[in-house]
Image (cartoon, grey):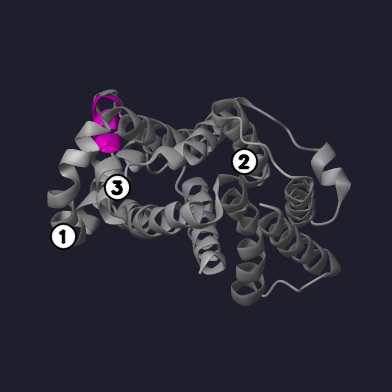
Amino acid sequence: MPWLLMMATALFWAGNAILGRAVAGQVPPIGLAFWRWVVGAAIILPFAWPHLQADLRSMLRAWKPMLAFSVFGIAVFNTTLYIAAQSTTALNIVMLQSTMPVLIVAASFLLFRERVSVRQALGIAISLAGAVTLVSRGNPAVLAGLDLNRGDVWMLAGIVSYAVYTALLRRRPMVHGLSFVAGTFLTGAAMLLPLYLAETLSGRPVPLTPVAAGAILYVALFASVLAYLCYNRAVALLGANTAGLAVHLVPVFGTILAVLLLGEVPRAFHAAGILLIGGGIWLARRGG
């Protein structure tokens, strides 16, 4: 059920971006990323262990692509997102994330010469227009007033990294999804360990507070284990260029949660943005 997989991924990503911004200043970014993958690996290992025993040799033979997946999809992307959240706004994060499907298309072409059909390109453009409509609340002046800063450069670097990860998923070894996720989580955490120790020794340890524990648990379970299982499977079913449009569903879920939980009044731009995103994804899927 690729639509369900894309929606679940977007829901968990929406929470990750908001939480990363909410705990900025309370939880250091590299520490949050490191413990995210350590706890995520601990959650999934009991389920993945039987498959890891069968798949370990296959993953070791494919160590180069496995290392690339761990670098681009685990170690780099989320760490740069949390670093970006220290100095930029949630609006800038979501706006920059909206460019990811376009960068996925570019990465797929540069790495594998994969071209997009006219219908697929039109669907991506329509979906992007819908995401911009939601994020800007239908007001072009919001876009004109965006103030880009150093955090946005970190965010853009992370988006490029995840676009490469998505495009590379076609080279994923033929192993069970739980084995693949557990392997990349553990490798990504190992890569972040020296940076985490340096951050801690520099005077920024992860605090032992309920806020830090809750943040780590959420990003480990929902934004890591569940989101990556759903997203990796969606890419396998739909291809990188179409599955990457899950990013445009992030502001959709942000809108729905604002209406249901915060009492925000639905407006015309909400409907317009959601319809554009839904129509664009449908068109891209048909043309993929």
Mark earlier in primary sequence (3, 1): 1
Mark earlier in primary sequence (2, 3): 2
Q: Residue at x 16, y 60 (%)?
A: 46
Q: For mark 1, does the 10 Å Cα neighbourhood hold few (<14), some (14 to 19), or many (20 or more) residues?
A: few
Q: Amino acid at mark 1?
A: Pro
Q: Is residue 209 magenta?
A: no
Q: Give residue 5's position: percent from left, percent from top.
A: 50, 64
Separation of disc 2 and disc 3 at Cα?
23 Å
The correct choice, above or below, for 20 with respect to 190 in the image is: below
Q: Nearer the viewer, mark 3 or mark 1?
A: 3
Reading the image, the residue beneath label 2 is 100
Q: Which element carries disc 1, helix, strand or loop?
A: helix
The correct choice, above or below, for 148 with respect to 288 in the image is: above
Q: Residue at x 37, y 30 (%)?
A: 68
Q: What main secondary structure does the magenta stretch of the protein show?
A: helix
Separation of disc 2 and disc 1 at Cα?
33 Å
**Pointers 3 and 1 in contact (C-beta within 8 Å):** no
Q: Can residue 82 be seen by looking at this rendering?
A: no
Q: Nearer the viewer, mark 2 or mark 3?
A: 3
The residue lying toward the viewer, choosing from 260 and 100, is: 100
Q: How many marks?
A: 3
Q: Residue at x 64, y 68 (%)?
A: 258
The correct choice, above or below, for 155 with respect to 246 in the image is: above
Q: Amino acid at mark 2?
A: Met
Mark earlier in primary sequence (2, 1): 1
Q: Can residue 123 be seen by looking at this rendering?
A: yes
Which disc is residue 46 wearing? 1
The range drawn in magenta is: 187-197
Q: Is residue 196 magenta?
A: yes
The residue lying toward the viewer, choosing from 61 and 81, is: 61
Q: Which element carries disc 2, helix, strand or loop?
A: helix
Which disc is residue 180 wearing? 3
